[in-house]
Image: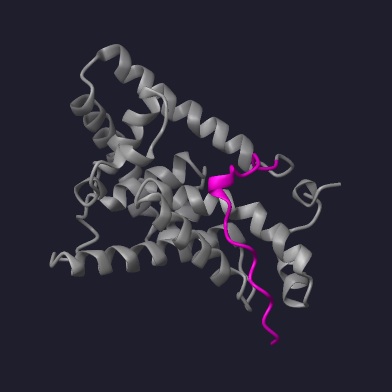
Amino acid sequence: MDDCDDVTRTDEELLAAWRAGDAKDGKLLWQRHSRSVQRFFRNKVPWPVAMDLAQRTIESGLRLSQPVRCFRSYLLGIAKHQLFDHLRSEQRKQRREADLETLVIDDTVTNPEQWVSAKREKRVLLHALRCLPLPIQLVLELRYWERLSDREIAEVLDMPIGTVKTRIATGRVELRAAIVRLDASPDRLQSTLDSLESWASRTQAIATPGVPDPPLEPRDTLRPLPPLQPR
């Protein structure tokens, strides 16, 4: 059986084995969550930066020494901090105020479609998400890409559940308005919104225990797993 097909062991078991020196189990944990971490970054920063931040996130997650309720949520929480640190650094380089509560990703990236290759509906949806304030973009992507619950999103983003609920409701309205601005066709508007739901369903199927992620494409492959450091 391929490592990627072993769904009988929990993240906690794999992490404990990795910390005990089992590189094979560390690799399996790495493969299990690499897609979620990459998805978190890929619609917010250029692809090479996304891969670098994903690598840092997973390496940091593998250094975990305390128990956590959900390893994937823990990883995505690290990803949030990695993203925020990167964006603040980029804002300082451009001599801009680093207010991430109002930051719009689409305003910080030149020609984002250069690294987004997709059908029109998906491309419009990705662009519309980047046109939203970052906090709104984050909650929508965590809900529809990762299918996280309100509580899990609150844990990842370190905010009250009530704020999460409000931002999801507000975000759907703002997302629809952004899609209209980008493509005024009523038929394509509905097609794009339908794409959001179907995309979420496909992502949920991939994230379901027992259903492994699709294999990484060559350009998506993370660097080799770093050697385990003795405790």
Where is residue 110? Give x, y as percent.
23, 46
Q: Residue at the location (19% across, 69% down)?
A: 92
Q: Tell me, yes or no, whether the highlighted magenta stretch contains residue 171.
A: no
Where is residue 70? Give x, y as percent.
61, 60
Q: Residue at the location (40% across, 58% down)?
A: 49
Please tell me in which quadrant of the rendered image residue 90 appears: bottom left
Q: Residue furthest bottom?
A: 231
Q: Residue at the location (63% across, 63% down)?
A: 224
Res 225 seen here: yes
Give 150 or 193, whichever is nearer the viewer.
193
Give 171 or 78, whichever is nearer the viewer.
78
Q: Residue at the location (78% across, 77% down)?
A: 20
Please tell me in which quadrant of the rendered image residue 213 appears: top right
Q: Tell me, yes or no, whether the highlighted magenta stretch contains residue 228.
A: yes
Q: Residue furthest front?
A: 218
Mostly what secondary structure, the magenta segment? loop
Please state the extent of the stretch shown in magenta in the rendering: 212-231
Give the quadrant of the C terminus: bottom right
